[in-house]
Amino acid sequence: MKLRATLIGFTAILMWSFLALFTAASGRMPPFQLSAVCFAIGSIPGLVVLTLNPARLALLKQPAKVWITGIAGLFGYHFLYFTALRNAPAVEAGLVAYLWPLLIVVGSALLPGERLRWYHVAGALAGLCGTFLIVGRNGVEFDGAYAIGYGAAFLCAFTWSGYSLLTRRFDAVSTDVVTGFCLATSMLSLFCHLGLETTVWPATVLEWVAVAGLGLFPVGAAFYAWDYGVKNGDIQILGAASYAAPLLSTLILVLFGFAELGWRIAFACLLVTGGAVLAAQDMFRRKIQQPVAAE
């Protein structure tokens, strides 16, 4: 059960790897408008499930703390991320924001039944170094003039790691509630868009396809898979493995001609993959020991 849930959590990381590609192909739609549209699309799979099985609507009745955590996690992360990118260079802001996998691994020690071991931290740090090579490939220079952006990026990392860790404590709450989180995030993003941005719609069929792809996968199904994974899987392994997202994202951009392959990418691949394997020792040991226990 735990292995299956962890693998489902991995699919979220895989889907997030397509975020950059779909975003690059989605045209010039402003970020909050894009967020509003994508989260509306992302709620569709959940709405279909609820329509086909109305009895599951009862699962949406949850304490206020569950709804506050979910909406603050999804909307808060994206609001802070967009704020960071608007007030600091994308490279540095992205690097700071991507501290969240490390924070998940370290913070997991506070969860009931979890123990933080040296290889969890070492694996997460290896992934962080690999991410640094990718995100900082053109150089990194932190400037005090961008303090607001860096601060937002730091809060962004804490927001998503906090959401993931708190979600683990709501393991009895059905993943169906993610549908409500997506709808609420879409509405809040729409309000921000109307107050802060000028509406721009995709100009081509390809851009519409990219927007739909964003909504269905990286900003849709990925959140359902992540919710199930962190509640029922190995959150430490998922946290360390999350550093694979920027690596896979870069490799996908290379594959589609949006980036070039170089020594940084190759070395980052070794760091991220090695770190994920190191952090996943417990899972590998359980898999090896299971046949022995069965005998």
Image: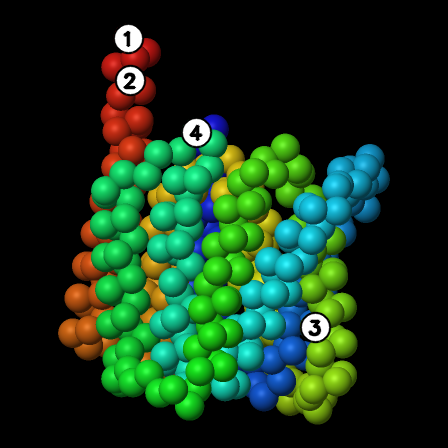
Label 4: state its secondary structure.
loop
Label 2: state its secondary structure.
helix
Callout 4–callout 2 Cβ contact below 8 Å? no
Q: From what the image shows, is residue 176 above or below residue 208?
A: above
Viewer-nearest of discs 1 and 4? 4
Callout 2–callout 1 Cβ contact below 8 Å? yes
Label 1: state its secondary structure.
loop
Q: Position of residue 22 (x, y in %)?
A: 51, 74
C-alpha span from label 1 to label 4: 27 Å
Residue type at the position of mark 3: Ser
Earlier sequence position, callout 1 versus callout 3: 3
**Label 3, residues with CA under 10 Å away: few <14, some 14-19, many ≥20:** many
C-alpha span from label 3 to label 4: 36 Å
Label 3: state its secondary structure.
helix
Q: Determine which residue is flagged by label 3.
A: 189
Q: Which mark is residue 113?
A: 4
Residue 49 shows in the view? no
C-alpha span from label 3 to label 2: 50 Å
Q: Position of residue 175 (x, y in %)?
A: 64, 43
Earlier sequence position, callout 3 versus callout 4: 4
Q: Which mark is residue 291?
A: 2
Residue 151 shows in the view? yes
Q: Position of residue 250 (x, y in %)?
A: 34, 71
Q: Determine which residue is flagged by label 1.
A: 295
Residue type at the position of mark 1: Glu
Residue type at the position of mark 4: Gly
Residue type at the position of mark 2: Pro
Residue drawn at point x = 36 percent, y = 55 percent: 102
Residue drawn at point x = 38 percent, y = 63 percent: 99
C-alpha span from label 1 to label 3: 55 Å
**Label 4, residues with CA under 10 Å away: few <14, some 14-19, many ≥20:** few
